[in-house]
Amino acid sequence: MKTYRAMVLVSGDSQSMERGAQQVYAKLEEEIAAFGLQDEISLSMVIDIGRHDATPLVIVYPDAVIYGPIAPENVHTLVDEHLYKGRIAAGLQAPLKEMTGRIAWLSARKGTLPAEQRIVLERAGLIDPESVEDYIINDGYQALGKVLAEMTPADVIAELEKSGLRGRGGAGFPTGLKWKFVAKTTADQKYVICNADESEPGTFKDRLILEGDPHSIIEAMTIAGYAVGASEGYIYIRGEYSLAQERMHRAILKAQEMGFLGEHIFETDFNFKIHIHSGAGAYICGEETALIESIEGKPGVPRSRPPFPTTNGLWGKPTLVNNVETLANVPAIIRHGASWYHSFGTPSSPGTKVYTMLGNINVTGVVEVPMGITLREIITIYAKGMKKGSSFKLAQTGGSSGSVIPTSLQDTPMDFDSFGKAGVALGSGALLICDEDTCVVDLARVLVNFFRVESCGKCGPCRIGSQRAYEILTSITEGQGTLKDLDTLLELSSNMAIMSNCGLGQTAGTPMADILKYFRAEVEAHIRLKVCPAGVCTMKPHLHIEKVFEPTGTIAKQ
Amino acid sequence: MTVATVDGQVVLEAVKKAVKEHGATIDELIPILNDVNRALGYLPAQALEEISRQLRVPKSQLFAVSSFYSMFSTKPRGRHIIQFCESAPCHVVGGRQVWQSLLDILDLESGETSSDGKWTLVTTSCLGVCGVGPVFIIDDDIYGNVAPGQVAEILARYS
């Protein structure tokens, strides 16, 4: 691999692209060549860098100087001053503010922050996602080559089972076992689906993988296709992620051109092709059977299970559905072996987990750390503590279907089993960290509202339960609640968990059960004293007329 | 007030282009609807009928799908669509104040279109840019770390 004196990164998120990042990139290329530096300087377009106040950004390493906003006409000065003369180009630096987690991890490379353990985000942000060559230089498609040349499908699955990898979409189902279920079915056609319908509130880890390292998903899906005997795959990307869709589309074309996809991959008899399928704004399509319905051109309404997709999935054929983060682990496991993977994390949940840190903390953004790290460690080390003047009250994990974690559980190791024993859920890896200015009733109301809006309406417990819970929680925030309401909430929560058809309804009641378990006094203060201890709720009836039945997009005030 | 409904020929062109791009198979239905919705701003009944004919899918299914997904609209909308994220991560970092400021300035309720046909205001679930909340999107432009005081200035950028 070639070594360079300096590395120049141009931000390639959608906002930067709109503001001319492409032109800045072209101009940089031209200027670097004009100074004859093309062999010493590496230039790449990277994903969302995490600050949007001064885009497009240009970052120069190893000095880690951030310039922005940069217009094509600034490029000459920048190259002349910084890259040619070796001093900081005065006046072009981005203002020192709004540092987010992703900037923070870039500086982690300089040893100023505690290091992370990166497996799935190993390349994201460091390679040019549009360049298959960059991916190949950084060990890309090695695992696929190894699988096709040296391993039988059964070997691949055995290795995966030995690694102990568990699904990262939230449920934590052993991945190797799922692959085995699909592999042992016999059918003329099987499918592999990558679930990239990431819509858990607060979660954007999959977007970073798709935008920053699209080829890793292609490689993993192809390996999965070989292991389970499928020749076709779908990536279901949520409709809002247009940049991820474009990048993935171009990556697929490139992989086909290089012979990593299509017919006779690596000159073997194995064929595999991948389609991209865009979502259209429905959280429920993250549920695997709803996702399959959606690909089949129907409303995303979950099917009744069993039968499971592993035997009766897309078009009734055996189908493997895996989350983006789960798949992104696969090439690394194949390359380094199962025992290497076991050296990270805890014995029952090996490997790493990507967390998105949000809320009232100093550094928001994404970290990838070994399984089993505690919430306290995340807050104090990676999030650099709570915001000045605030203290930790609770964290909400895994987006809306996660749990509320009170202070008493902040030293519980974050892995599937430890969290399960403590009665809370790890979910999709969002960590919404709230301070004492957050009202638990108001928070639960917002979370339940999300499910009320996103419920597909197929089964009664979820459709009616989430509506009723929302009404009760709203009346409590308006000072109209009664103590009996609290019993009703608990009853709703347990009924929804037992009787709903899919994961959405089953977990929709968790937030209200959690706040009553850990913060009952605060909830009761709303009812007994008509006071919101956090000072958030209005505590008076709202003069609004709910337009529940009015479809969106109506034209008002004619 | 007038929100322009789209001319028949334009509708057929948009459908033709989308079907050609994705192919006339049922598994491409949602990508096709996405393209048409994007091109026309909404899904007119005529477009749904044409897609139904070309893909040989029952009209009932077309109408079921187009009313199920939140990115599709079966009614004309304003020239600019403001999507405000109402999920918890944006909510706890000041989203409520930003939402109030949007309501005050636009004098609209969620789901409504302004009488001059300029704005449609909708709330949406998480947009996946939670690191910079509170967030709203106008058309394709994402605004993050929004403070209530900035809303008027941001809206003034659109004509």
Image: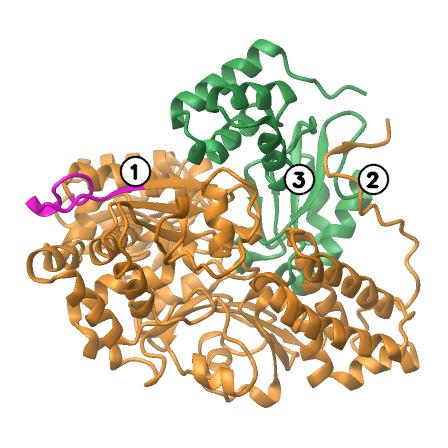
Chain colours: A orange, B green
Q: Chain of mark 2?
A: B
- Which residue is label 2 attached to? B107
User: Is A157 one of the magenta-colored residues?
Assistant: no
Circle 3 packing at 10 Å, graded few (<14), some (14-19), many (20+), is many
x and y percent of residue B158 in the render?
A: 65, 31
- Residues at badges 2 and 1 in contact (C-beta under 8 Å)? no
**From which residue to which does the magenta span run?**
A260-274
- The C terminus of chain A sits in image quarter: top right
Q: Which element carries disc 2, helix, strand or loop?
A: loop
- Residues at badges 2 and 3 in contact (C-beta under 8 Å)? no
Circle 1 packing at 10 Å, graded few (<14), some (14-19), many (20+), is some
Disc 2 marks a residue whose amino acid type is Asp
* Dot 2 and dot 3 within a common chain: yes
Q: Chain of mark 3?
A: B
- Which residue is label 3 attached to? B82
Separation of residues labelled 2 and 3 (CA atoms)? 13 Å
Residue at image point 40% right, 53% down: A312
- Which residue is label 1 attached to? A250
**A251 or B19, nearer to the observer:** B19
Marks 2, 1: nearer the viewer: 1
Mark 2 and mark 3 lie on one chain; the one further toward the N terminus is 3
Tell me: A541 left or right of A185: right
Q: Which element carries disc 3, helix, strand or loop?
A: strand
Tell me: A33 left or right of A386: left
User: Is A261 one of the magenta-colored residues?
Assistant: yes
Most prominent secondary structure in the magenta stretch? loop
